[in-house]
């Protein structure tokens, strides 16, 4: 029997807790959360509510609970050095040290690492610590993507044509970033379809989980502002409709080379999840960014399908023996749709903006799985906060059935709520397929013209 420390309070950690408890090893969960997630609390032997920067408090809680190892869910405690702190008291972790979590917390670190070790995948890019040279570089690229160097909750990236249109707007955003961050990264804008590839890594062996496609935009048909993710889907063949298994292999190969480069660069083995955000372009797979943990919502697509014992996986990551483990996932499709307040992502002066503190009721959700995120469990019921409330996941033999299960369950949740009804639907999937066909055809025409 293992005493497992779970750090985090979102839907991602809720599904991790569920995966832990499915183990044949009869583990016991002790959860350290920033706020009380009722789903995680119900699965835990003991919980403690505290700040993710309270490393002394986390260490004391771990000692008091006789923790055998820890699983770190979100990026903030990784960035705060919680793994380093726990390892000081001989508690191993599934999650990288602070220096290795730079893979996520510093986009400049990752771009430079890939460049230094000649790993394929980088777009054309430059990193700036001041405004000097930015104007000239903007003139070299047709369209750009601007990224702050640091954690922004998945909402700091701005894309030309979507979030800004003119050079003056681009320069102004770069100024704003440099007031708060050490660097601004400017990438060429890549045209293609994105996919998430969450990989398990012990520093030497890297194993891909089924690819997932996330939907960042707040509203139907990919309109509105970026969010932490409104939902996601995966397919029963462990590919996606607009890609093939070669694309998955290419993403995995890049991640394997990055894991090798991290060890060469730092002398440390990366132990945890390396989650690559990739895009398939006319020239192949390119890297958008890495995260140093499971995705939210993407964890909800893959962990319910995991057939291999999750505790065995955690131990293999910690011990560096992933190469000895056969990791399997069910051949099923999944669709995750996030329930959010109507006011989520809206300006403060919008009439629906105040819906973020409303009460919600969950009525008789039959076939779907529910994973709680930012909710407040009070004496008189469940209340939303300002962020995503509940991840609703449908699982079935194919994507169409999984989507129906998720959508039916969403309609059972009452209150001032909203969601993306188009996630996982045939029209949106076909739009992705056609988009990819157009891109590949344009690539062939360009290649033949040469």
Image: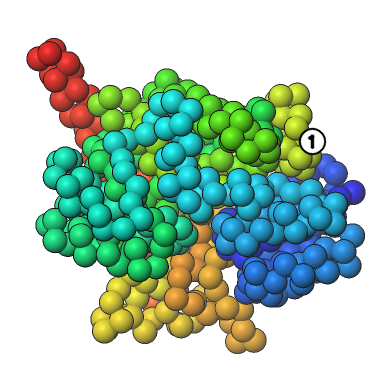
Residue drawn 77% across and 70% down? Answer: 56
Q: Where is residue 347 in the image (x, y as percent from the top left)?
A: 28, 77
Question: Which of the two residues, 431 or 253, is positioned nearer the viewer here?
Answer: 253
Q: Where is residue 198 in the image (x, y as percent from the top left)?
A: 53, 39
Residue drawn 28% across and 24% down? Answer: 283
The outermost residue toward the bottom is: 380
Q: Position of residue 418 (x, y in %)?
A: 37, 68
Give the answer, above or below, for where 333 lies relative to 85.
above
The outermost residue toward the left is: 449
Question: Which of the two residues, 245 or 165, is positioned nearer the viewer here?
Answer: 165
287 horizontally vs 369: left or right: left
Q: Specify whether residue 363 is in view.
A: no
Q: Specify whether residue 416 is in view.
A: yes
Number of callouts:
1
Local secondary structure at mark 1: helix
Q: How is the image coloured?
A: rainbow
160 horizontally vs 147: left or right: left
318 horizontally vs 66: left or right: left
Q: Position of residue 270 (x, y in %)?
A: 65, 39
Q: Which residue lies under the disc numbered 1?
A: 319
Dot 1: within a 10 Å radius of its alpha carbon, few (fewer than 14), some, or many (20 or more) residues?
Answer: few
Residue drawn 30% across and 67% down? Answer: 176
Give the answer, above or below, for where 16 lies relative to 124.
below
Question: Which of the two residues, 144 or 216, is positioned nearer the viewer here?
Answer: 144
The image quarter containing residue 309 is: top right
Question: Which of the two residues, 285 or 242, is positioned nearer the viewer here?
Answer: 285
Residue drawn 79% across and 48% down? Answer: 92
Q: In which quarter of the image is the C terminus?
A: top left
């Amino acid at each position: 029997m293992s005493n497992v420390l779970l750090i985090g309070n979102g839907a991602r950690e809720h599904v991790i807790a569920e995966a832990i408890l499915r183990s044949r090893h009869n583990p016991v969960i002790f959860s350290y959360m920033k706020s009380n997630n009722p789903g995680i609390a119900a699965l835990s032997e003991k919980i403690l509510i505290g700040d993710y920067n309270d490393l002394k408090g986390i260490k004391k809680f771990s000692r008091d609970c006789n923790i055998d190892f820890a699983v770190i869910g979100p990026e903030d405690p990784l960035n705060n050095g919680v793994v380093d702190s726990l390892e000081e008291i001989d508690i191993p972790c599934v999650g990288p040290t602070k220096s290795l979590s730079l893979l996520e917390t510093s986009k400049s670190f990752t771009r430079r690492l890939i460049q230094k070790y000649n790993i394929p995948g980088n777009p054309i890019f430059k990193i700036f610590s001041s405004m000097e040279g930015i104007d000239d570089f903007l003139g070299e690229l047709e369209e750009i993507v601007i990224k702050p160097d640091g954690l922004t909750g998945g909402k700091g990236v701005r894309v030309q044509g979507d979030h800004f249109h003119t050079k003056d707007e681009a320069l102004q955003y770069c100024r704003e970033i440099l007031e708060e961050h050490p660097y601004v990264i400017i990438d060429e804008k890549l045209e293609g379809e994105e996919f998430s590839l969450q990989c398990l890594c012990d520093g030497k062996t890297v194993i891909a989980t089924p690819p997932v496609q996330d939907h960042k935009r707040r509203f139907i048909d990919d309109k509105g502002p970026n969010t932490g993710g409104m939902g996601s889907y995966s397919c029963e063949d462990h590919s996606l409709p607009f890609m093939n298994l070669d694309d998955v292999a290419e993403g995995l190969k890049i991640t394997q080379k990055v894991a090798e480069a991290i060890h060469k660069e730092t002398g440390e083995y990366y132990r945890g999840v390396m989650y690559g955000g990739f895009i398939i372009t006319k020239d192949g797979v390119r890297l958008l960014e890495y995260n140093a943990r499971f995705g939210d919502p993407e964890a909800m697509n893959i962990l319910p399908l995991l057939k291999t014992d999750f505790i065995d996986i955690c131990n293999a990551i910690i011990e560096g023996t992933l190469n000895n483990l056969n990791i399997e996932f069910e051949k099923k499709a999944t669709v995750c749709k996030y329930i959010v307040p109507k006011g989520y992502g809206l300006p403060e002066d919008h009439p629906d903006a105040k819906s973020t503190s409303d009460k919600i009721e969950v009525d008789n959700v039959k076939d779907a799985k529910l994973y709680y995120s930012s909710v407040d469990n009070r004496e008189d019921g469940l209340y939303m906060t300002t962020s995503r409330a509940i991840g609703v996941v449908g699982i079935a033999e194919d994507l169409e059935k999984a989507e129906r299960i998720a959508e039916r369950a969403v309609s059972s949740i009452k209150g001032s709520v909203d969601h993306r009804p188009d996630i996982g639907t045939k029209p949106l999937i076909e739009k992705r397929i056609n988009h990819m066909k157009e891109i590949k055809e344009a690539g062939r025409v360009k290649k033949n013209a040469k």
